[in-house]
Structures are given as structure tokens and as C-alpha cells.
Image (spheres, rainbow, N blue to C red):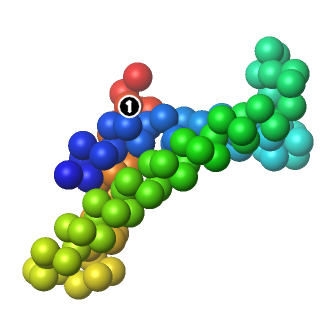
Amino acid sequence: MNLLLGLPATVPLFLARYIIVNGPLAALGWTRRDSGENDGMLPWVIVAVPVFCAFGLAWGLVNVWMRRRTTAASAAQYWFACVAASLSPYVAGFFLL
């Protein structure tokens, strides 16, 4: 289930990466801002916050529901596996594309 949730997770993860690269890291001089990014960060925050909240709520509810039915692993192992499985499509796409 978390691998399937990882596919739409690429959108909020990309938004988070874009905001971090064009915001704080660019202000520190570690990266360069996108040349077309001259509106500031407020429009990105307005777009990103609902996306983060919607995905986080869906991911959390699905995993809490599935955790109640799973007793084979401890809570720490279960949540680590959930996060790793959800991030794997983004990491695979980031390194393979």
C-alpha cells in the first residue's frame, strides 16, 4: 500500500525540494534560484501547504488503519518500513531520471 501511496507522494516531495532549493538554500548561497522564480515564496507556500496536508492526512489515516491490523512488527519497525516504502518511488525516479 505504501508503494502505491509513494507514487502520488512525488508531488509533495518535489514541492518540498523546490521550495528548499529556491528558498533557504539559495539565500545561504548553496544553490542558485530558478531564473523565472521572481514572485517570492508565498505563492509556493499557498500551493504547497494544502498538498502537504492532504497527502499527510491520507497517508497517516491509511497507515494507522493498516497498523491496527498488523501485529507482526513493532511500531518503530512498521513506521520505518512505511516511510521507506513511501519514499522509494521518489528516490528511484530522482536517481533514474
Q: Callout 1: 10 Å neighbours few (<14), some, many (20+)?
A: few
Q: Is residue 48 above or below residue 80?
A: above
**Numbered disc 1: secondary structure:** helix
- Whether residue 16 is visible, yes or no, is no
Tell me which amino acid carries mark 1: Gly
Q: Which residue is mark 1?
A: 93
Q: Which one is in front, 6 or 57? A: 57
Callout count: 1
State the residue at coordinates (38%, 31%). Answer: 93
Q: Is residue 74 left or right of residue 50?
A: left
Q: Is residue 18 left or right of residue 65?
A: right
Residue 89: x and y, percent? 33, 40
Q: Quadrant of residue 29?
A: top right
Q: Which one is in front, 64 or 31? A: 64
Q: Is residue 59 left or right of residue 23?
A: left
Residue 47: x and y, percent? 66, 35
Q: Which one is in front, 94 or 70? A: 70
Q: Is residue 39 above or below residue 66?
A: above
State the residue at coordinates (86%, 31%). Answer: 40
- Whether residue 47 is visible, yes or no, is yes
